[in-house]
Image (cartoon, grey):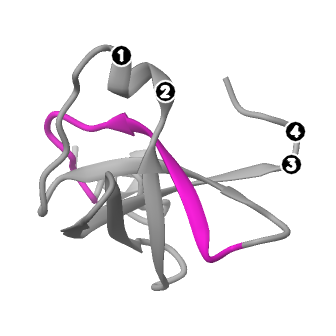
Amino acid sequence: MVKELALEWDGEVLEKLPAWILKVRLKDVWAEIRCKLSGKMKQRHISVIPGDWVKVEVNQYDMTQGRIVYRYNNYDSSKNNTDANEPWDKEV
């Protein structure tokens, strides 16, 4: 569930910092932000390591910090690309 003033982006975890803080590079805007795990991910003991693709919620007022809300199992970057996999691009 997304809060009203939060923006969602996909990103790749670059490094793990102390106190459960992770440095994430966002895919669409190519910015690096600091993120924390959401409370549900901590409760369920979902681990995130460098190289994982995650979904991040970022507050629109402070775009330097975010919250990791989902870790992708098998991330396919072409799936989220609007130009790829269009029906008219396929050969019949």
Tag 3 and tag 4, C-beta contact below 8 Å: yes
Quadrant of the rendered image containing residue 4: top right
Q: Secondary structure at mark 1?
A: helix
Residue 31 x %, y % = 49, 84
Q: Looking at the image, tell me whether mark 4 or mark 2 is earlier in sequence order.
A: 4
Q: Quadrant of the N terminus?
A: top right
Please name which of the two marks, 1 or 4, marks the residue nearer to the observer: 1
Residue visible at 12% across and 62% down in the picture? 51
Residue pointed to by mark 2: 39
Residue pointed to by mark 4: 4
Of residues 86 and 67, the one drawn nearer to the viewer in this rendering: 67
Q: Secondary structure at mark 3?
A: loop
Of residues 22 and 90, the one drawn nearer to the viewer in this rendering: 22
Residue visible at 71% across and 32% down in the picture? 2
Which contiguous range is marked in magenta?
Answer: 63-77
Q: Quadrant of the C terminus?
A: top left
Of residues 49 and 20, the one drawn nearer to the viewer in this rendering: 20
Q: Looking at the image, tell me whether mark 3 or mark 2 is earlier in sequence order.
A: 3
Q: CA distance from mark 3 to mark 2?
A: 18 Å
Residue 9 x %, y % = 53, 57
Q: CA distance from mark 4 to mark 2?
A: 18 Å
Amino acid at circle 1: Gln
Residue pointed to by mark 1: 43
Specify whether 24 is left or right of 31: left
Specify whether 17 is left or right of 82: left
Q: Secondary structure at mark 4?
A: loop
Q: Residues within 10 Å of mark 3 (few under 14, many from 20)?
A: few
